Amino acid sequence: MRKTVMILALLLTAACGRMPRVHYYDFSLDAPARAAAPAAGVLWVQPFTALPAGGQDRMVYRDSAWEIQFDAYRRWIAPPPELLREALVEYLRGTNRYAAVVTASPHQEPFSVLAVRLLRFDETIAAQGRTGVTRFWFELTDERGGLLRSGYIEGRVPISGEGADGLVEGMRDSAAQAFAELLEQL
């Protein structure tokens, strides 16, 4: 009898507690300014690569310069390399800068290849406030692999507002800022 009461008490205690729900987030960017006429070439945007911490769907935040942490209950709908590649392809298509922006190897020439290594896509928490950071390394090559341009790109935007809405808006704005800077380099 005593054993049964203890089991019932344990089950009742477990039933009262509820696991927090995992929330998934996505974002879209505003359309950029369109070029008057498309350039003659095709741009192949290769799949993004990322550091190991950036290759998962959990949201990342930093509350010190050297340590990253993961939010257990807020996630992106896809790992940031996939999410940002899709957003960048749509962004570049919207510029009308290229005859085509593709995600598979083109079968026509001339074409350029854009490779991106995602270095940061996180929220930074400091005494001055919260900041959304998107940082990556890019390489633009021709169809034969000749390097045309490369460099670091960073978007850094203060996060205003509380909760997930402010965070997602800040991360979206940091990505938009980084993409605008990349567009200037292409």
Image (spheres, rainbow, N blue to C red):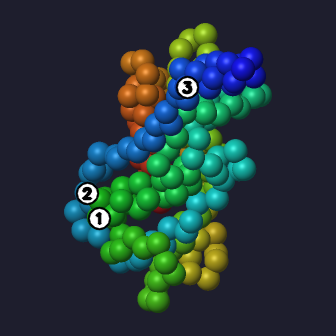
Res. 15 visible in picture = yes
- Eyeballing the image, is 110 above or below 72? below
Across and down, in percent, residue 174 comes to 47, 37
Amino acid type at image mark 3:
Ala
Q: Residue at x 64, y 59 (%)?
A: 49
Q: CA distance from mark 2 to mark 1?
A: 5 Å
- Eyeballing the image, is 131 above or below 78? above
Task: Find disc 3 in the rendering and name its residue.
Answer: 15
Q: CA distance from mark 3 to mark 1?
A: 56 Å
- Quadrant in which residue 4 is drawn: top right
Q: Nearer the viewer, mark 2 or mark 3?
A: 3
- Of all residues, the one furthest to the front in this rendering is 1
Chain-order first, disc 2 or disc 3: 3
Q: Secondary structure at mark 2?
A: loop
Q: Residue at x 41, y 54 (%)?
A: 87
Residue 96 is marked as: 1
Amino acid type at image mark 2:
Arg
Task: Find disc 2 in the rendering and name its residue.
Answer: 34
Q: Residue at x 70, y 44 (%)?
A: 53
